[in-house]
């Protein structure tokens, strides 16, 4: 078999789309097996496009890998930059996650063994979602805060996005904890409303006071309330009574409404 | 990304010794995370891949995106090339599927079909074409553009029925019937 190479004219005609299917097929099959002609076709390639693609490719390879959370959010239809903003995990958030997990592990390791442990869980569990939300957005903890504050991305949307990550984690945590406390899963459900109410109030106050101060104040307030309830009635479960749940529901709705309104100054009528 | 740019420039300008490595050796180096080998692989194969993709789609942005996706996939999956078959064919297999993904992700797309009027080629080319195709060449060219597109997607580009259907934006059943029709026409022409 003779060694045949496509001449420059044929390759130019191929690259220019001036060949019929049979010749196109012939050239393409030949190119797959012939390094000389592959090199020859490079002469008619778009050099500026190749340089651009190379730069972009290297750029992609040097980019930090996309996290699991981002992939999940993108899968749900969120734009990639928004997913990155939502997921950007600061070290503080990791600390929160670790602390939450530790809480759950404690609850699992000593199921109902120590009443004092249950008390601690009941006091601290509602604070977990709030802490998560507070950490989700705030200059104290967010390395991207400057960037976010100067961008036009709606802050409320960002906080809600980040809460999207916080809430499922909290849900799993509550479920895990519920195994270990007296009362079982019912108790865990009891935590939900106070927990969400505290988180929503933090959100509402974040605009004026930042995330950290409301979170600390509300934590102190809640702990005092729970300890007071235990001192008064002998059981920390008193802090989860029906009236408390109702108040929490009202607070949740009011705080959510306030948070939503307060964050759209451009929509105010003056 | 000066590093990458230099890599391409070097391998193109000087041949740097590395370019003498076989495709398989380059790919093995890429699998070990050798960015220079990757630059050489790009310099060697991106041009013809770009030209071949360009024959599939007139939009340079689509070609650029597909080419980029291809080499990102090559960098991450170089270790998956098991040494079976030829590297260029393997690369094209990746490129045409990345191209398919880019194109299918767009709401509307036009896939280029080969032109119907051939240019006059040299006697050598005619001999080559005659050897490879015989009377099939003429029969192939006489197929309607729709049939040609299906033949190219399945036979030339190695796509399966589902992939060809996605590429050409037609139902899978249509791909099958058009392929059967093309096969029948070619068989008639050759008998």
Image: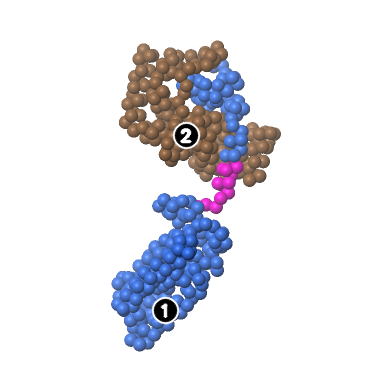
Chain colours: A blue, B brown
Mark 1: which secondary structure? helix
Within 10 Å of disc 2 (Cα), the crowding (few <14, some 14-19, many 20+) is many
Is residue A239 placed above or below B92 in the rendered structure? below
* Residue sitting nearer the eye, A31 or B168: B168
The residue shown at (48%, 61%) is: A266
Which residues are drawn in magenta? A54-67
Q: Which mark is residue B96?
A: 2
Looking at the rendered structure, whether the residues under marks 2 and 1 are on a common chain is answered as no
Q: Quadrant of residue A53?
A: top right
At which x and y percent is residue B33?
A: 58, 45
In the picture, which quadrant includes the N terminus of chain A? top right
The residue shown at (40%, 27%) is: B150
At which x and y percent is residue B57?
A: 48, 31
Report the predominant secondary structure element of the magenta stretch.
helix
The reply to whether residue A103 is visible in this rendering is no
Mark 2: which secondary structure? helix
At which x and y percent is residue A191?
A: 36, 73
The reply to whether residue A255 is visible in this rendering is yes
Is residue A129 placed above or below B98 in the rendered structure? below
At which x and y percent is residue A143?
A: 56, 62
């Amino acid at each position: 078999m003779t060694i045949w190479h496509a001449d420059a004219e044929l390759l130019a005609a191929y690259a220019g789309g001036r060949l019929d299917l049979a010749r196109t097929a012939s050239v393409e099959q030949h190119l797959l097996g012939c390094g000389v002609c592959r090199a020859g076709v490079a002469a008619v390639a778009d050099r500026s496009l190749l340089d651009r693609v190379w730069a972009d490719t290297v750029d992609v390879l040097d980019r930090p890998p996309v996290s699991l959370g981002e992939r999940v959010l993108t899968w749900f239809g969120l734009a990639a930059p928004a997913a990155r903003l939502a997921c950007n995990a600061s070290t503080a958030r990791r600390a929160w996650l670790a602390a939450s997990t530790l809480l759950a592990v404690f609850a699992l390791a000593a199921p109902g063994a120590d009443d004092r442990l249950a008390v601690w869980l009941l006091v601290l569990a509602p604070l977990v979602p709030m802490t998560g939300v507070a950490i989700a957005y705030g200059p104290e903890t967010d390395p991207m805060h400057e960037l976010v504050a100067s961008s036009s991305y709606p802050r409320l949307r960002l906080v809600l996005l980040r809460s999207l990550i916080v809430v499922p984690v909290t849900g799993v945590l509550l479920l895990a904890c519920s195994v270990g406390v007296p009362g079982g899963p019912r108790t865990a459900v009891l935590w939900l409303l106070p927990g969400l109410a505290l988180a929503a109030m933090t959100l509402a106050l974040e605009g004026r006071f930042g995330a950290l101060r409301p979170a600390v104040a509300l934590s102190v307030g809640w702990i005092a309330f729970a300890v007071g309830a235990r001192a008064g009635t002998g059981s920390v479960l008193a802090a989860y009574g029906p009236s408390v749940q109702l108040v929490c529901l009202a607070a949740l709705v009011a705080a959510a409404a306030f948070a939503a309104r307060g964050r759209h100054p451009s929509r105010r009528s003056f | 990304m000066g590093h990458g740019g230099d890599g391409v420039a070097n391998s193109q300008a000087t041949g740097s010794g590395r370019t003498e490595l076989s495709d398989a050796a380059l790919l093995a180096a890429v699998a070990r995370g050798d960015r220079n080998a990757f630059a050489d692989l790009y310099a060697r194969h991106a041009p013809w891949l770009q030209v071949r993709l360009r024959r599939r789609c007139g939009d340079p942005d689509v070609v650029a995106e597909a080419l980029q996706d291809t080499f990102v996939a090559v960098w991450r999956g170089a270790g998956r090339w098991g040494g079976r078959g030829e590297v260029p064919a393997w690369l094209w297999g990746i490129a045409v599927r990345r191209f398919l993904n880019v194109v299918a992700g767009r709401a509307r797309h036009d896939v280029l079909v080969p032109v119907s009027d051939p240019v006059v080629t040299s006697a050598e080319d005619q001999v080559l074409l005659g050897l490879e195709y015989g009377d099939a060449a003429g029969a192939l060219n006489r197929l309607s553009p729709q049939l040609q597109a299906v033949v190219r997607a399945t036979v030339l580009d190695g796509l399966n029925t589902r992939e060809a259907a996605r590429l050409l934006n037609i139902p899978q059943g249509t791909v099958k019937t058009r392929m059967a029709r093309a096969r029948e026409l070619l068989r008639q022409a050759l008998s």
